[in-house]
Amino acid sequence: MKIPAKVVMKVVSVSGTCEVGHQAGQEFDLSGEITLGYSKKPNTICPALFYAIYPNLRVLRFGGSFPWEKDQDMAQVACPDPLNPVVVHLKRMRE
């Protein structure tokens, strides 16, 4: 089995107020330990955002790509809150 690639999530923008407190510039190593919740503690990701990114995360970790992305090591995803969207980039880190 292929070893999963490291994927980093970077918060690109936040419109409105994120209940978890995500802010532009935050980065999370999705290959390491993270916590899902609303605590605003380090390495805590909003559950709704995580569920939105999860399918894209799996594709990137295991070598897939998205034909609509210019960079085949990247995916752009937004959280499902239409009034306070958080937009993130997922980036596969090649070794």
Image (cartoon, grey):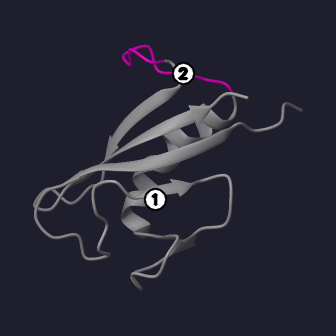
Q: Quadrant of residue 33?
A: bottom right
Residue 37: give x, y in percent of width and height: 45, 79
Residue 35, compared with residue 66, is above or below; it is: below
Residue occupying image coordinates x 84% and y 31%? 2
Left or right side of 76 for 59:
right
The structure residue drawn at horizontal position 54% and vertical position 21%, both measured from the top left corner, is 65
Residue 16 in the image: x percent, y percent?
10, 64
The residue carrying mark 2 is 65
Helix, strand or loop: magenta stretch:
loop
Residue range (magenta):
63-71
The span from disc 1 to disc 2 (Cα, nearest Å) is 19 Å
Q: How many marks?
A: 2
Residue of label 1: 50
> In this image, 67 relative to 65: left or right?
left
> The N terminus appears in which quarter of the rendering?
top right
Q: Amino acid at mark 1?
A: Phe
Which disc, if any, is residue 90? none
